[in-house]
């Protein structure tokens, strides 16, 4: 299996796992929804989980991989405020939890770059 295919399938797996987790344990995600968003945190948790599942399917399929990977990069940028919210809310928690919340912030950069790399190697490239 070519490296680019493996990378795309790993990204799809990450997205699918995260998407399922949004439905299996939504409480964890509800707490990270920025309070400025309208509606209930649970609704946003489910919407983001469904988006991750749809993106996973798109990235897994060669025919839709490029567009889905670009959408995934945008999604990773779009959920960054939730990571900021988590870091703010967890600033008084024990050091390991606080460190985990802070570590999520720079993690978005390699995720965005990974999705863009999958898009570049995806089918339909010009």
Image: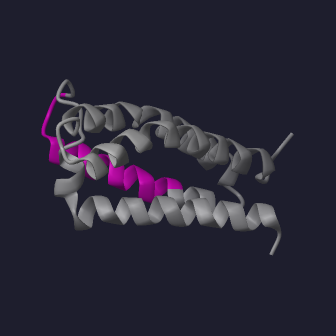
Q: Verify whether residue 51 appears in magenta.
A: yes
The spot of residue 36 in percent (x, y) is 19, 24
Q: Verify whether residue 67 appears in magenta.
A: no
Question: Which residue of the protein is positioned furthest toward the top in this rendering?
Answer: 36
Q: Main secondary structure of the magenta part?
A: helix
Q: Residue drawn at (65%, 41%), measured in percent from left and top? A: 113
Q: Quadrant of residue 1?
A: bottom right
Q: From the viewer's perspective, is residue 41 above or below residue 50?
A: above
**Could you tell me which quadrant the C terminus lies in?**
top right
Q: Is residue 27 visible?
A: yes
The spot of residue 13 in percent (x, y) is 53, 67
Q: Residue drawn at (27%, 46%), measured in percent from left and top? A: 95
Towards the viewer: 32 or 1:
32
Q: Is residue 60 left or right of residue 17?
A: right
Towards the viewer: 97 or 126:
97
The spot of residue 5 in percent (x, y) is 75, 65
Q: Residue drawn at (33%, 31%), measured in percent from left and top? A: 84
Magenta-tinted stretch: 38-55
Q: Is residue 61 visible?
A: no
The spot of residue 27 in percent (x, y) is 16, 55
Question: Which residue of the protein is positioned furthest toward the right in this rendering?
Answer: 126
Q: From the viewer's perspective, is residue 73 above or below residue 16?
A: above
Q: Quadrant of residue 33?
A: top left
């Amino acid at each position: 299996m070519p490296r680019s295919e493996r990378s795309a399938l790993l990204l799809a797996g990450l997205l699918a796992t995260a998407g399922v987790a949004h439905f299996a344990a939504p409480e964890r995600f509800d707490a990270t929804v920025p309070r400025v968003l309208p509606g209930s945190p649970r609704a946003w948790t489910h919407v983001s989980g469904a988006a991750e599942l749809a993106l996973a399917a798109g990235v897994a399929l060669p025919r839709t991989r490029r567009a889905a990977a670009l959408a995934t990069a945008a999604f990773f940028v779009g959920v960054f405020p939730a990571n900021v919210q988590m870091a703010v809310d967890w600033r008084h928690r024990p050091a390991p939890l606080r460190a985990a919340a802070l570590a999520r912030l720079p993690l978005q950069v390699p995720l965005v770059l990974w999705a863009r790399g999958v898009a570049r190697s995806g089918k339909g490239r010009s």
